[in-house]
Image (cartoon, grey):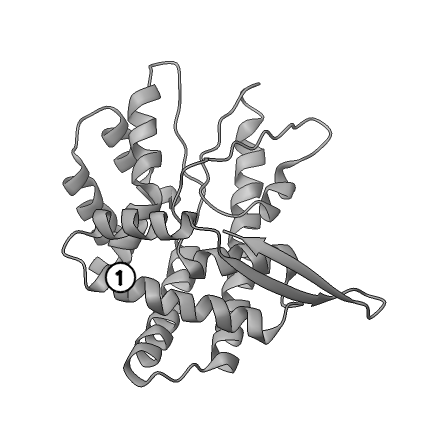
Amino acid sequence: MPIESEPFVHDYAKGRVEEKEFWRSIALLTGLTDPFINSLKLRFQSVLDCTRDVYAGDRRIHCYQDMKSYVEEKRIQEKILLLEFRYRATGKLRLREWKETLLEEMKTLGDSWRRAADRILEGAGESPENVILYGGYLEPIKHLIGPENRVEIVLLEEHWKSPLDTLRTILWRHGFDISDKTIEQYLRLQRTYLDLVINSRDIDEAHEAWTQMARRPTRISISRQRSAGEDVQEELRW
């Protein structure tokens, strides 16, 4: 969350404001419209609820992201929404534009996380033990590892992910050294996912339905190149 939202997070953790009022304050602060606020809620509501559950007088809560990150991420998310709309409306997958946009997103998020990591490392020196609640990718966590810092990663066993989020995770791991066919497969699955969500009256039920579908053994082959030029095939099950 942005640094400027820290007072709102504290009020929510202390039970002074409820969920609806909290997100209204975030919308006013960031200028984000309802679709983006709803996306943030899906990503961060469980983290916010956790801060309320564990909050105590001897614990402090800090936010480390800057507003610049929110502005940049909003701009890229608008591009992604437009690409998704065009794909659903025309049936034409603009793969080159998708790759350019996802590459821009990866660079932007990487830069954003590095700035946040610098603030975290600066603030963490005040306390011997810190807990960081972060719902993103594993690769940027390396910025927090140092001679005096130990990072423990806790993975959630039951957590739904859209095909686009799964593709993002793969790109963080492999970069764009994967085949266009693999990227296309995930983007086509994203269209199926969106149809499921849009046509549902209850978004939670739609996510549960997608989770059940995702638990079925589905295989997608990831083709990438080693530095020596040898073709490597990986099979992803999800």
Q: Quadrant of residue 236?
A: bottom right
Query: Residue at position x 48%, y 75% from top?
Result: 98
Residue 73 placed where, x, y %? 41, 61
Query: Which one is in front, 57 or 200?
Result: 200
Residue 142, by quadrant, is top right
The residue sitting at 53% across, 40% down in the picture is 119
Q: Quadrant of the N terminus?
A: top left
Q: Residue at x 18, y 38 (%)?
A: 19
- From the top left corner, tell me how far across and down residue 90 is, in percent: 31, 85
Viewer-side residue, 109 vs 237: 237
Q: Which residue is mark 1?
A: 196
The furthest residue to the right: 228
Label 1: state its secondary structure. helix
Residue farthest along the front direction in this orientation? 217
Q: Please tell me whether residue 43 is drawn above or below residue 224 in the rendered image.
A: above
Res. 33 in view = no
The percent position of residue 170, horizontal first and vertical second, equals 57, 57
